[in-house]
Image (cartoon, coloured by chain):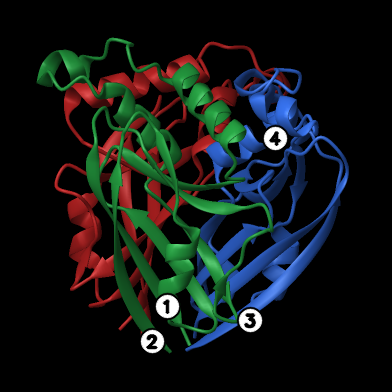
Chain colours: A red, B green, C blue
Amino acid sequence: MSVVGKELQYRTKGFSDVIDITSDVNSVIAIKNGIVCIAVIGSTASITTIEYEPALVADFKEKLEELAAHDQPTRHGDTWGDDNGFSHLRASLMGPGITLPVNDGRVVLGTWQQIVLVDHDNRPRERKVFVQMVGE
Amino acid sequence: MSVVGKELQYRTKGFSDVIDITSDVNSVIAIKNGIVCIAVIGSTASITTIEYEPALVADFKEKLEELAAHDQPTRHGDTWGDDNGFSHLRASLMGPGITLPVNDGRVVLGTWQQIVLVDHDNRPRERKVFVQMVGE
Amino acid sequence: MSVVGKELQYRTKGFSDVIDITSDVNSVIAIKNGIVCIAVIGSTASITTIEYEPALVADFKEKLEELAAHDQPTRHGDTWGDDNGFSHLRASLMGPGITLPVNDGRVVLGTWQQIVLVDHDNRPRERKVFVQMVGE
C-alpha cells in the first residue's frame, strides 16, 4: 500500500472553461488498484466528468450560466469589487473535486466519460490540480 | 491495509430513475475501517444520498426536471440525435460518485439516509456501479 | 499506512447555515500524506468548500433558496408534515461529503478556500461530521 501525490498545472480562460484532463490524470497514476482523489486548489473551480465533445461542453456552460449568471449582482462582488461572485457560487455547488476508483492502473470511467477541470473564475488563471492516489 | 473492488449491476429505467443501492453496497463491504468510493460508470448517471421514500423521490425527480428539462433542446441532441443532452447536464452537475467512511464494517450513514444510483439517461440501461474500498 | 476516524460535532441553525470547519478538520488530521473523507451524517446537510466571508455566504444561501425555496410545497412535506422537503433536495443535489488530499499533515486547499458544513434542515440540529483518513 502506498500514497502517491502529483500536481498537474493548467492555463485556463475562466467563465467555466472546461478542460479535459483525463489523459494527464491517467499518465500520473502510479498504483495498480485503489482510489484517486482529483481536487483543484482554489474556491472558483471544480472537477467533474462529462462526455467531452464541443456541443455538450457548450450546453454545460450555458446551463451554468442559467444557474448562476456571470452578470448577476452579488454581495461578494459589491463588497470586494472582484466581480466573480458567480464563479464562487458555481464552484461551491459543484464541489472542488471528485474521487474515483483505480483498477488495473487506470481510472475507472465509461467510454464516453472524461475527467474535466472547470474553471469558473472571471479571468485567465494558472490552476493546480492535486492528484492523490492511495492503493497498491 | 487492503484494496477491495466489487462491481454491482442494475437495470434502470432512465429519466433520473432513483434506485436504493445501500444494502447492496453494505453487503460487499470487505473492510472494517476505511473509505469506500462508489462510482457509476458512464456520463449520464450519478450517485448521491437521499431519504429514500416515494414522496421525496418524486420531489427530487421534479427538481431535476426543473434544473434541466428532458425536452429542453440541446446542442448535444441536435448534433448527435440521441436527445439525452439533459441527462448529461444533470450527471455533470451532480458528479459520478461519492466517497464515504466505512466504520466497523458498515458505511457511515444516518438513519434516514440511503445511497442511491440516479440514472439520468433517456432510456432503460444496464448500469455498472464500481465499489472500491481502501482500509483495514 | 493507517486508517484514523474522528467525529466532530456542531450545533447548527438550519436553513443552509454555513459553518467553517476547516481548522477543526486540520486539527484532527493524524496522517502525513493520504486522503481525507469528510462526510456529514444525515440526509439534510452537505459539505463543500467556499471562500468563507459573510457576503459570499449570504450569496450562497440566496442561491440555494433560488434552487429550492424553503416555502416551496413538496410531496415529502405534504406526506410527512415535517416541511423540510427543500432541505432534502438541496442535500441530495450537493451530496453528503467531500474527499480531499492530505499533504504534509494538512488538507490541500487554496488560500481563500475553506471547508464548510451546510445544514439545510428547517430547525436547529446537533450534527456529526465524520472525518476518515487513510494514509501514512
Residue C65 lies left or right of residue B25; in this view the side is: right
Residue C135 screen position, x and y as percent: 49, 81
| Classed neighbour count for the residue bearing mark 4: other residues with Cα under 10 Å, few (<14), some (14–19), many (≥20) | many
- Residue for badge 1: B134
- Chain ID for label 3? C
- Chain ID for label 4? C
Q: Determine contact: label 4, label 3, CB under 8 Å.
A: no
Residue A23, by quadrant, is bottom left
Circle 1: element type: strand
Q: Nearer the viewer, residue C75 or B44?
A: C75
- The structure residue drawn at horizontal position 64% and vertical position 75%, both measured from the top left corner, is C29
Dot 4 or dot 3, earlier in sequence? 3
What numbered label is drawn on residue C30? 3
Which is in the foreground here, disc 4 or disc 1?
A: 4
| Classed neighbour count for the residue bearing mark 2: other residues with Cα under 10 Å, few (<14), some (14–19), many (≥20) | some
- Residue for badge 4: C87
